[in-house]
Image (cartoon, rainbow, N blue to C red):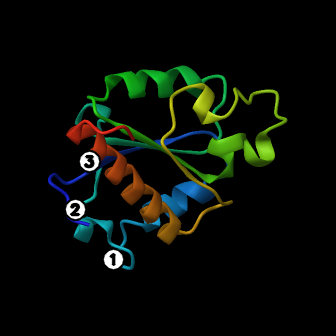
Amino acid sequence: MIFKRSPWVFVFHGAGCNGCNLEVFATVTPRYDVERLGILIKHSPRNADILLVEGMVNKKNASRIKTVYEQMASPKAVVAVGSCAISGGVFADSYNHAGPLDKIVPVDVYVPGCPPRPEAIIDGILKGVEILENRRKGKKG
């Protein structure tokens, strides 16, 4: 896949066990090296094209996720990584669980697993890039 622009990713870590966090950051290590694909991790949502959320959405970070989403320029894509972001995972019955990510912001790509492998996370980001390219061209996606 050839990108017109390098996709920049902002990673939002929700509450949880940090398993997904370790796998997300394993994707930027030399073994997986997503930077060779032009994918860069950014530390500001204002500069990012893709919001990657991993971990459980709890009552405190739900409003923060929404704020981060609103700070991003359009077009943008959201990737939910791991069971906790998708459904709450093992924390689904927790008193502090605010619901799955797609009840807070619209999710474009789901990467299931507990935790998902770096290969699956990279695939999810690439699907998000494809959605971004389609939105830039004006196609539905």
* Residue 114 place in picture, x, y as percent: 68, 60
Q: Which mark is residue 133?
A: 3
In this rendering, the answer to whether 127 lies above or below 15 is below
Q: Amino acid at mark 2?
A: Gly
What amino acid type should be assigned to the residue bearing mark 3? Glu
Residue sticking out furthest to the right: 93
Q: Which residue is mark 2?
A: 38
The x and y percentages for residue 6 are 19, 54
Judging depth in this view, the residue of 34 and 43 nearest the camera is 34
How far across and down, in percent of the image, does residue 99 sit? 70, 29
Marks 2 and 3 sit apart, C-alpha to C-alpha, by: 14 Å
Camera-side mark, 2 or 1: 2
Q: Residue at x 71, y 41 (%)?
A: 87
**Earlier sequence position, callout 2 versus callout 1:** 1
Q: Which residue is mark 1?
A: 30
Q: Quadrant of residue 52?
A: top left
Screen quadrant of the N terminus: bottom left
Q: Residue at x 53, y 55 (%)?
A: 21
* Residue 127 in view here: yes
Of the residues under marks 1 and 3, which one precedes in the sequence?
Answer: 1
Quick one: which residue is furthest to the bottom in this view?
31
- Label 2 residue SS: loop
Element type at marker 3?
A: helix
